[in-house]
Structures are given as structure tokens and as C-alpha cells.
């Protein structure tokens, strides 16, 4: 089997992951822009407890995205399964998007502008989860490549 045919599955999956990554990032941007559309004349006496609870839950999903990606990528490398590597990234993307959704919900429910900080966290998580070809090459090589799966790169 030649080198080009061997790399095709990993490269094709990476291109697919880049499309999915871009779509999730666009979704977060749309949620953020919706906060300006649905901006209501809410007073500043919103429910701070609710905003903090939703914000803390959102931050926990942000942290869980890194744990889930790390565990699933390690398992994908051990089993040499590119499909599990793709799943690892998609789960991480969804958990970061969930952070933005919870921030949006907190803003809609409470009207407090600091609930929008969840969008910054979500975008930061998405940037840190940018799918690199090194991780997929690591899975394809069965853990013998030089890529470090625990390292987060931009």
C-alpha cells in the first residue's frame, strides 16, 4: 500500500472535523449575536444565583470536554480506531458549545450581562480543541508517532 493511500483516511477525517469545528464555532457566534437581538429591557436585579449556577454548570462542561477528549483519544490510539478519534473531537466540540448554550440561557433567564462570559469560555475551548493532524496520525500509527495527545495546540 502506498503512502498516499494510507494517509487518506486520517486526512479525510481531519477535513470533516474541520468542517464540524467551524460549524460549532459559527453556532456559538450565532448564539452570541442572538443576545443582541433578544436584548430586553431587563433590570439589573436579575437572579444572581441562577446565573452563577448556570455559569458553573457551563464551566463544568468546558472542563469535561478536555477530559472526554483525552480519554477517548487515548482509547482510540490503543485500539487504532480513527472513528473513535473523530468521536472524541465531536464530543469535545459539543461540550464546549453546551457552555455557550448555558450562558445564553442564563442571559435570557436573568438578564445579567456577566452571563455572557460563558461565550468567551466556549470560544476558548473550541480554539483549544482545534483538530490537528498529529492526533489523527498518532491514532493511525497506533501510538508510535511523536505526537503528544495530552498537549493542546492552537
Image (cartoon, rainbow, N blue to C red):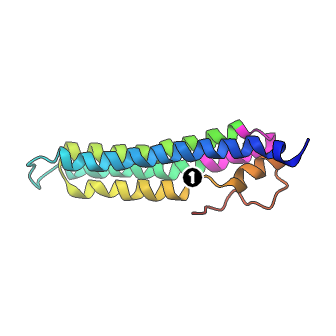
Magenta residues span: 68-82
**Residue 72 among magenta residues:** yes
* Label total for image: 1
The foreground one among 74 and 25 is: 25
Please tell me in which quadrant of the rendered image residue 154 appears.
bottom right
x and y, in percent, of residue 70 in the image: 65, 50
Please tell me in which quadrant of the rendered image residue 130 appears.
bottom right
**Predominant SS of the magenta segment:** helix
Residue 154 as seen in the image, left or right of residue 116: right
x and y, in percent, of residue 45 in the image: 11, 53
Residue 144 as seen in the image, left or right of residue 35: right
- The residue that appears at 85% across and 55% down in the rendered structure is 144
- The residue that appears at 32% across and 45% down in the rendered structure is 31
Question: Would residue 142 be visible to someone looking at this image?
Answer: no
Question: Would residue 34 be visible to someone looking at this image?
Answer: yes
- The residue that appears at 34% across and 51% down in the rendered structure is 55
- The residue that appears at 57% across and 47% down in the rendered structure is 18
Reading the image, the residue beneath label 1 is 66
x and y, in percent, of residue 97 in the image: 43, 45
**Residue 69 among magenta residues:** yes
Q: Quadrant of the N terminus?
A: top right
x and y, in percent, of residue 86 in the image: 64, 41
Amino acid at each position: 500500500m502506498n503512502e498516499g493511500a494510507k494517509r487518506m483516511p486520517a486526512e479525510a477525517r481531519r477535513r470533516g472535523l474541520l468542517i464540524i469545528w467551524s460549524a460549532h464555532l459559527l453556532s456559538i457566534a450565532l448564539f452570541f449575536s442572538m443576545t443582541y437581538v433578544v436584548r430586553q429591557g431587563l433590570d439589573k436585579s436579575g437572579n444572581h444565583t441562577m446565573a452563577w449556577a448556570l455559569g458553573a454548570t457551563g464551566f463544568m462542561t468546558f472542563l469535561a470536554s478536555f477530559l472526554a477528549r483525552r480519554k477517548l483519544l487515548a482509547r482510540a490510539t490503543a485500539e487504532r480506531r480513527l472513528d473513535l478519534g473523530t468521536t472524541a473531537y465531536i464530543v469535545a466540540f459539543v461540550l464546549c458549545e453546551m457552555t455557550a448554550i448555558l450562558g445564553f440561557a442564563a442571559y435570557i433567564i436573568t438578564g445579567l450581562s456577566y452571563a455572557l462570559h460563558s461565550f468567551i469560555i466556549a470560544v476558548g475551548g473550541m480554539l483549544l480543541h482545534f483538530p490537528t493532524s498529529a492526533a489523527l496520525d498518532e491514532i493511525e500509527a497506533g501510538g508510535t508517532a511523536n505526537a503528544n495527545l495530552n498537549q493542546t495546540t492552537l
